[in-house]
Image (tube, rainbow, N blue to C red):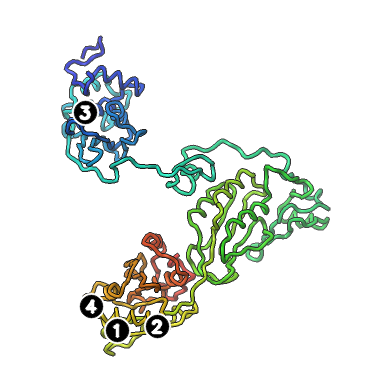
Amino acid sequence: MDSAAGTVKTARPVGQYDFQEFRELVRWFHSYPAPGVLIGGYMVERARCGLPTGTLFEAVVETPKCLPDAVQLLTPCSTGNGWMRIVHLGRYALSLYDKYTGQGRRVAVDPDKLEEWPEIAAWLFKRKSKQEQDSDLLFDQIARAGDAYMKEESVQVDPGLLGKQSSGRIARCPVCGEPYPEQQGRICPGCRGEAPYSSLGSAPEAGEGRPRSVPVERAVGKHALHDMTRIVPGKHKGPAFSAGQQIGSADVCRLQQMGRTSVYVQEMAHDSREWAHEDEAVLEFAKRMAGPGVTYVTPPKEGKINFRADQDGLFCLDREKLEAFNLVPDVMCAARQHRVPVQEGKVMAGCRALPLYLSRQQLDKALNVLGQEPLFRVLQLKRARVGIIVSGTEVFRGLVQDRFAPIIREKVAPFGCSVVHSQVVPDERQAIADSVRDMLQHGVELIITTAGLSVDPDDVTRQGLLQAGLTDMLYGAPFLPGAMTLLGRIGEARVMGVPACALYHEATSLDVLLPMLLADVEITRKDLAGMAEGGLCLGCKACTFPKCPFGK
């Protein structure tokens, strides 16, 4: 190395640049001639030389450190134009590939070839700190080695990386109001808590419209601004003072016993365009949240509104919207699980604004998230005409007593369904298909088949249903017990195949899915996959379903 000139003798060029030129280019781009970018230059050229002349290529880089800079310096590929993708595998490697076919060349550092270049090996494996590195020796070895310690292979890039990935429709985030790709969710990732910073912005300054407290002794004759809760551990929790209630002299001691030395009173509050009282805010939320079959009681109590079922049915909620609402600061909403049966008058959800006064800014954000479509609904359950097909040659021949039909009758009866037809058929496709047609002639709206769904050669229920015209079939579900459940349609009738496990277990997939079928809810493979969490029955000695985690 010529230390006076700062150049390296016998240095290998990097594409159209000699080493010194490329080093200065890296210094200009990176503010420092980073070794990783210099090494990356040789890797880019090695990969490019492996492609046929004239190939329009894109790049995949397996580390976000330095190597992407080399790609952007020496090729048209960048993260901005979408021609370079970073897949963080932690390996110092890159691939250049035909943008249409995905065929390309991958270049990586080969540690087995680094013995001749110890300073490069020390840099790669971080055996020395930056202060301990001999920079001149490191640059000398990088320049003389070129691509000698690299390995190369042919690759076929995954189809998902071919072509430009569209960000789709751009929407305005209902929380922050900024544009973002709508496919990322109902609200932008930043408002979901994924922003790498905390906002230093503040709510409106305290002033007119914000409540001011007064000592309890001076509150006599004034009116409480909000409900004040009294708790007796294990015995009582409820408002001891209601909003608007006049405070008397006898109440001073009681308030002090409740831990209040000062209180908010209506006489010290004023209307404001900047703030909304908790009761006003939660009423606005309730109007947006409640859909068909849902009611709520006013006025709010302790800043909270509960939602109740206005009819027996299936409780449904918009999970994504519920999550988005709870990501808005200073508000909350809790609910029962999606798609569970509820009884008329039972509480299903509760909502409240957390501070006594909510800024209008936060109120508007929460209302924007809720939109105009309801958050909660209760779907009416159909009193379906049920048909039962018990499949089993041993039962058909009278060798075994049928115990399945009574179980099905017991399961559907609480929902007001009537079993209008029941048949026992042998394990034969044609017999099962004929039985289905017979069921339809009897006006059956829900066909439930039993057993015949496992891997045994005699189990042909599924094939018989397909022969009868089964469509939209979903076979297999993440339930234990109930893994071999079958769902589908034949004409206007819903179909459910119940595996033999229902003969033994008190609660199975049948108990979870039956209310959804009666509510005529469309069930997709994705819906079933979402039921995997909670799909394991604990097999308790005394079954308490549905008051247990199964199916939740």
- Residue type at mark 3? Glu
Mark 1 vs mark 3, CA separation in Å: 71 Å
Q: Quadrant of residue 29?
A: top left
| Quadrant where the C terminus is found in the figure | bottom left
Could you tell which of marks 1 and 2 lies nearer the N-terminus?
Answer: 1
Where does label 1 land, which residue?
425
Could you tell which of marks 3 and 4 lies nearer the N-terminus?
Answer: 3
Residue found farthest to the bottom:
398
Q: Are marks 3 and 4 in contact (CB under 8 Å)?
A: no
How many other residues sit within 10 Å of disc 2, few (<14), some (14-19) or many (≥20)? some
How many other residues sit within 10 Å of disc 4, few (<14), some (14-19) or many (≥20)? some
Mark 2 vs mark 3, CA separation in Å: 75 Å
The secondary element bearing badge 3 is classed as helix
Q: Quadrant of residue 461?
A: bottom left
Mark 3 vs mark 4, CA separation in Å: 63 Å
| Discs 2/4, front | 2
| Discs 1/3, front | 1
Q: How many numbered marks does the figure carry?
A: 4
Q: Nearer the viewer, residue 246 or 219?
A: 246
Q: Is 72 situated above or below 477?
A: above
Where does label 3 land, which residue?
45
- Residue type at mark 4? Asp
Where does label 4 land, which residue?
458
Where does label 2 land, which residue?
442
- Residue type at mark 2? His
Q: Nearer the viewer, residue 209 or 117?
A: 209
Could you tell which of marks 2 and 3 lies nearer the N-terminus?
Answer: 3
The secondary element bearing badge 2 is classed as loop
| Quadrant where the N terminus is found in the figure | top left
- Residue type at mark 1? Val
Q: Percent x, y for residue 156? A: 21, 43
Q: Is 92 situated above or below 351?
A: above
